[in-house]
Every structure is written in C-alpha cells, then in structure tokens.
Amino acid sequence: MLWLRSLLFYIFSFIYITVCATVILLAIPLTSPNTRYEIARFWSRSTLWVLSKLCGIHYQIEGLENIPRDPTVPLIILGKHQSAWETIAYPSIFPRQLCFVFKRELLFLPFFGWALASLQMIHINRGDREKSRQAVATQGKKQLEDGKWIAIYPEGTRTAVGVFNAYRKGGVRLAIATNTNILPVAQNSGRLWARNSFLKHPGLITVSICPIIDVHGKTEEDLQKELENTIESEMRRLDL
C-alpha cells in the first residue's frame, strides 16, 4: 500500500502541476506576478491536502509567534532542506509572498519551469559562484524592496537526515548587505519524504520556526555561526 499510495501521489502531482502551470502560463497576459503567485499558493495548499489524504503525511508548525505580525517587515528565510516537501509547503506556511532562490536548471522543466519563470524569482547558475553571488545580491535587494520575503536553503541542496553540510554564505551576505533580519527554519521532512526517494511514509512533519536573528552589528562569520547553530541544534531536537 505504501508503494501504491506513493505512485498515486506521483501521478497526481505530475498531472496537477501541469494543469496549474498551464493556468499560470495562460494568465500571464492578464495578470501580475503577484496574482500568479496566489495561484501557486493555491497549488501549494491543495497539494498538501492531497498528500495528507493519499500518503498520510501531515504537518504541525511550532514557533508561529516568531513570524512578525506585520507582514510588511522584510525578512530573509533560511531553512533546512531535507526534502521537496518544504518547497511545496512554504507558500502555505508564510503569510508574505516568497521569492525563492533556486538553481536555473529548474527553468528548463516543461510547464513547471516555464510557470516558475513567470513568477520572477531568483535563479542562479551553481557552476558560476561569482555570478550567483551577484544575482542574489542585486536581485535579492530589489525583491525585498518590492515587499517580498526571500527564501533560501543555505545548504544549497537537499541533505539526508542527520547529515550536516556547511551552509553557504549567500543568505547571510544578503542579510548584512540589506540590513534584513533572518528567520531560521528547521523541519524534519526527510524522515517521511527522503531526498531522491519515491516512497512517501505516513507520519507527522514538524516545522520549527526559530526566533529571528538580528543581523545588526554582526560580522559575516558570527552571523553564519549563529545561523548554523540555531538550525542544527533545533534539528537535533526534532530528530530525537
């Protein structure tokens, strides 16, 4: 049944994301990126609902009080990345429109990549670090000025449960350059939906939104260490 439920979710996801992406593409001449993001948010919420019904994967959120009540306050969200789950879930969790930083290869995916391009987020070439840094710095500043929250996975890729990869410094550098505080996020999604795994195991994912890290007066090294310690210590708690 686990294999069958996972297969059904995979088939649903393929069809549903194609339909939603097509709607976004057809809406481009008549809508703004903000409106198209709301379509993506609907896709996020409905996909999570189907995931719960088909695969028995539910989630709970801890630390909601750490999200600013005033959604116009600029933020950079730096989160643990274990699974595709959090990429689906983030638009449902956070009240402000998100601008993800992602590898440009995603843009080449039929329908999904084309729709993603229309949302005007930040795509980077991971093979050229210098250009990637420039893209995050220049485009990130503009996106924050436009009222969006930036979402970055500082590990750069999905990591297995219990594994620590040194965080990349792009998010911290952007935070310092724009005087924007950081919202660290930990989630144990990899226990149920492991990286590169077809199977989706039933259970409860916990998303822990940690207290905001104030960037003012801190060096890049100090801020990077504080970020890693905050998220990784929370991950150790969640993995117990």
Image: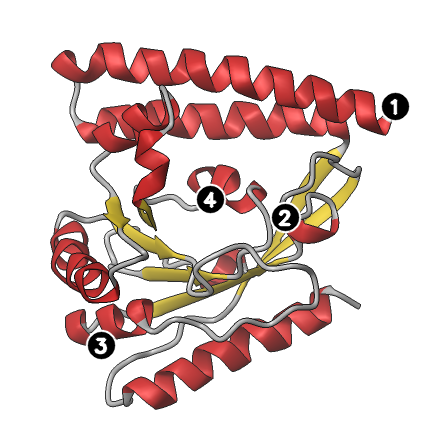
First in sequence: mark 2 or mark 3?
A: 3
First in sequence: mark 4 or mark 3?
A: 4
Residue at image point 24% right, 89% down: 217
Q: Tell me the CA gap for discs 2 and 4.
A: 17 Å
Image quadrant in which you'd find residue 186: bottom right
First in sequence: mark 3 or mark 1?
A: 1
Give the percent coordinates (x, y) of residue 23. Answer: 33, 11
Quarter in which the C terminus is drawn: bottom right
Q: What is the crowding at mark 3: few (fewer than 14 residues within 10 Å), some, or many (at least 20)?
A: some
* Helix, strand or loop at mark 4: helix
Of circles 3 and 1, which is in front?
Answer: 1
* Helix, strand or loop at mark 2: loop
First in sequence: mark 2 or mark 4?
A: 4
Which residue is tagged 4? 90
Residue at image point 65% right, 68% down: 163
Amino acid beneath label 2? Arg
Which residue is tagged 2? 195
Of circles 2 and 3, which is in front?
Answer: 2
Residue 176: give its label: 3
Q: Is residue 123 above or below residue 156?
A: above
Give the percent coordinates (x, y) of residue 210. Answer: 51, 68
Which residue is tagged 1? 1
First in sequence: mark 1 or mark 4?
A: 1
Residue at image point 43% right, 58% down: 153
* Helix, strand or loop at mark 1: loop
Q: Tell me the CA gap for discs 4 and 3.
A: 23 Å
Q: Tell me the CA gap for discs 1 and 4.
A: 28 Å
Give the percent coordinates (x, y) of residue 106. Answer: 36, 37
Q: Is residue 134 left or right of residue 60?
A: left
Give the percent coordinates (x, y) of residue 221. Answer: 35, 88
* Helix, strand or loop at mark 3: helix
Of circles 1 and 2, which is in front?
Answer: 2
